[in-house]
Amino acid sequence: MYIKPIQDYYPDDVAHCYGCGRLNEHGHQIKSFWDGDETVSHFTPKEYHTAIPGYVYGGLIASLIDCHGTGTAALAAYRAENREPNSLPPFRFVTASLQVDYIKPTPLGVELELRGKLLELKGKKVISEISVSANGIVTARGKVVAIQMPEKMLYVENRGQKIRQL
């Protein structure tokens, strides 16, 4: 069993996302793991992630839901095929649809917990529900429809050089 977050297994050529890319030094770099039948991630907003003093900007919440949703999709795809995340071909998902409901204002200065529940896995499409909690209180909930990234969007190795398939 693996202990690294799924984002650490993303191929280098597709690991630059602002929300979850481990190679984006300016991004959020969220990390998603299994926790039983749910996925979990934690993120502490910075003071500059503000909407109004003391509360988190809604766009940040949407991006966290988005990226935890695609991470949840990758985790679910590997689990469904009983594969380890470092096996090939890699599973990498992109967002086809994102719906976010803001339930309560999300306070700044506390760690947020994201929890993902798998709603559907059908072919190359994964639907998940992601909740955001602050101090144990759900402040936002989202639904993410993620689609498996076509292999032609991934780099492939050819005679020692990385090239993008088209």
Image (cartoon, helix red, strand yellow):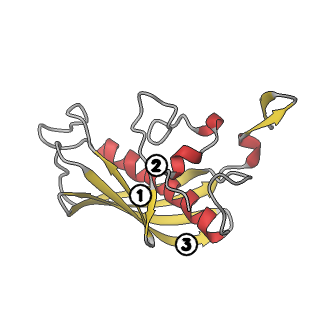
Q: Which residue is mark 3?
A: 120
Quadrant including the N terminus:
bottom right
What is the distance, in whole Å, between disc 2 and disc 3 at their CAs?
A: 17 Å
What is the distance, in whole Å, between disc 1 and disc 2 at their CAs?
A: 13 Å
Circle 1 sits in a helix, a strand or a loop, which is it? strand
Q: Which residue is mark 2?
A: 67
What is the distance, in whole Å, between disc 3 and disc 1 at their CAs?
A: 16 Å
Which amino acid does the dot numbered 3 rest on? Glu
**Residue at left 60%, top 45%?**
10
How many labels sit on residues?
3
Circle 3 sits in a helix, a strand or a loop, which is it? strand
Q: Is residue 162 above or below residue 127?
A: above
Q: Earlier in the sequence, mark 2 or mark 3?
A: 2
Q: Which quadrant of the structure image shows residue 13?
A: top right
Is 11 left or right of 18, judged from the image as shown? right
Q: Which residue is mark 1?
A: 99
**Residue at left 47%, top 59%?**
144
Which amino acid does the dot numbered 1 rest on? Gln
Image x and y of residue 6, in percent = 53, 52
